[in-house]
Image: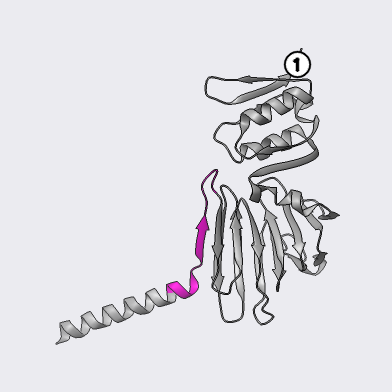
Amino acid sequence: MAAAAALVLVIGAGAMAAFFWSQTMPAVYATQMGERRSIELADGSRISLDSSSEVAVRYTDDARLLELRRGQARFDVTHDVARPFSVRAGGQAIVAVGTSFNVDVSGPDLLVTLIEGRLRIVPQPRADQDSRRVREISMTAGQQLDVPHLQPPVVRSVETARAVAWERGQIDFVDEPLGEVARRVNFYSTRQIVITDPAVASMQLSGVVDTGDVDDFADLVSHYLPVRAETRADGDVVLSRAP
């Protein structure tokens, strides 16, 4: 009887631990390189995950808490005043009630693009910062927040369709440095664009290419810029100044 009681106690403790774990640990969703995924949450909100991305989701009775750990995602939020929807990314807390927005942490800057509704950005102060000096930022539809590393954030007006072109399987860029565009192309392919010349990396380029299509991008660059594209034995493409 003592052994049976001990077994019941162990099983009961294990069940309680499992329940506690399920209530406190977030659900994690991720994509591989070149994969896109759509997740519908319990309240009807939806997450669209880009390539090589990961998001953690934890719902409580009074809050919807998410963390974009890497990559890029679009969030379409179901309206619920009683449970604010908050996404942590790049040292910021992005707070919404019912809205649509895109968050990109795939590059050196955090980019938050508001597609519809309103957003409130609550910066999370670093250990060496006075929290009283950290100001909240409000955004309206059609604006993008750019948070560079250790630099003041900037809010600008953008074409939201360009920011979410990845949902259509495209990269849409206007007058962007070639090095930055190459970084975005590399995000979707194991074959990489390699640029070692700073002068080539700083050249400006506009266009639209399919995600993962390295050859199409190389053809575009070599056609419109004084750049030569050479494919190495490993499949990577080296861009250098044309003679």
Above or below, comparing residue 152 to residue 1 in the picture: above
Residue 112 location, quadrant: bottom right
**Residue 237 is covered by the magenta coloring:** no
User: What residue sits 62% from the left and 31% below the top?
Assistant: 214
- The residue tagged 1 is 242
The range drawn in magenta is 21-35
Residue 105 locus on image (x, y percent): 66, 51
Q: Quadrant of the C terminus?
A: top right
Above or below, comparing residue 118 to residue 72 in the picture: below
Q: Is residue 195 visible?
A: no
Between 6 and 137, the one lying in front of the other is 137
Between 227 and 36, the one lying in front of the other is 36
Between 124 and 172, the one lying in front of the other is 172
Label 1 crowd (10 A; few <14 / some 14-19 / many >=20): few
User: What residue sits 21% from the left and 80% below the top?
Assistant: 7
Residue 129 locus on image (x, y percent): 76, 61
* Residue lying farthest to the left in this orientation: 1
Label 1 is placed on what type of residue? Ala
User: What residue sits 75% from the left and 48% below the top?
Assistant: 162
Which colour style is shown? one colour
* Residue lying farthest to the bottom in this orientation: 1
**Residue 22 is covered by the magenta coloring:** yes
